[in-house]
Amino acid sequence: MENPFVRKMERHVRLAPEDRAILDGLARQHIRHVAGRQDIEGPHTEPYHTHLILDGWACRYKQFPDGRRAIVALLLPGDLCDPFAFRRGRMDHAIGALTPVTVARITPDQIGDAVRGRPAIEEGLCREMLATTAIHREWIASVGRRSAIERLAHLFCELHLRLTWAGLADGTTLPMPVTQPDLADALGQTSVHINRTLKELRSSGLVILRSRRLTIRDLDGLRERGLFDPAYLQPA
């Protein structure tokens, strides 16, 4: 199967065969399997590496003392868990596996070797950082100003595009292994509210969520409902 990291980088830049081989090599070293609902990187640790998601879904999250959780990013195959982590410093959040995941650990030295004399790889990583920060801004805008149904519709549109680019969507049908509590923690709502919003999207003829698969029945309608503009996912 094609390396999802290579596929994703080719959304940003044109890679030579040598570039693809280098990136593929990064994804084949220091492989680790993590069970679902376990931390890939716990809070308050000081890692000098990042992890690349090869298979499964993960998230960045913050945990409050009373047990409440805020998911601040969803991580899909091809995503770097933290593209800014190539420095020493204490983690102010945790990275957790939402499903069983396979990851590759990548160190700063490996990144340095990969970009040396390879401008396309360097440009691709820079664009990946820009895309990551753009996604963060959209999530902040969603929690701050979008309505409940706009938040969920926007998230589904974003996931559809990201999974399509990763080669993991079948047209407008995509895997949706996360739970309603996961969606609630990502959107700043309760599970009850998420359930109600899902019913509204379904009754509007926009989506069907069944057996951990999301089918978007009206993509244009869902984008309109979520005020979704995909430009932020493709930074210039």
Image (cartoon, helix red, strand yellow):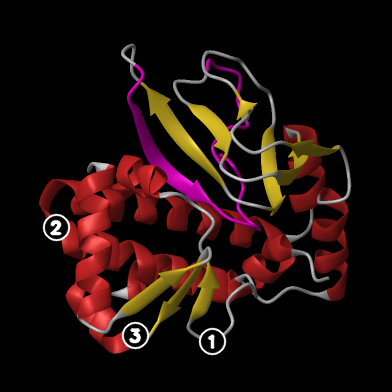
Q: x and y percent of residue 56 in the render?
A: 66, 52
Q: Residues within 10 Å of mark 2 (few under 14, many from 20)?
A: some
Residue at the image point whose x is 69% and y is 70% from the top: 7
Q: x and y percent of residue 61 in the render?
A: 43, 32
Quarter of the C terminus within the rendering: bottom left
The residue under label 3 is which amino acid type?
Leu
- For disc 3, the marked residue is 219
- Are discs 1 and 2 less than 8 Å apart at CB? no
Find residue 146 and name its label: 2
Q: Earlier in the sequence, mark 3 or mark 1?
A: 1
Looking at the image, residue 185 lies above or below residue 27: above
Q: Is residue 76 magenta?
A: yes
- Tell me the CA gap for discs 1 and 2: 27 Å
Residue at the image point whose x is 79% and y is 34% from the top: 109
Q: Report the number of discs.
A: 3
Looking at the image, residue 50 lies above or below residue 191: above
Q: x and y percent of residue 15 in the render?
A: 74, 73
Residue at the image point whose x is 61% and y is 62% from the top: 124
Which is closer to the viewer, label 1 or label 2?
Answer: 1
Looking at the image, residue 15 lies above or below residue 104: below
Is any part of residue 235 visible from this angle? Answer: no
- For disc 1, the marked residue is 171
Please name whichever residue, 197 or 101, is drawn nearer the observer in this view of the structure: 197
The residue under label 1 is which amino acid type?
Gly
Highlighted range, magenta: 67-90
Q: Residues within 10 Å of mark 3 (few under 14, many from 20)?
A: some
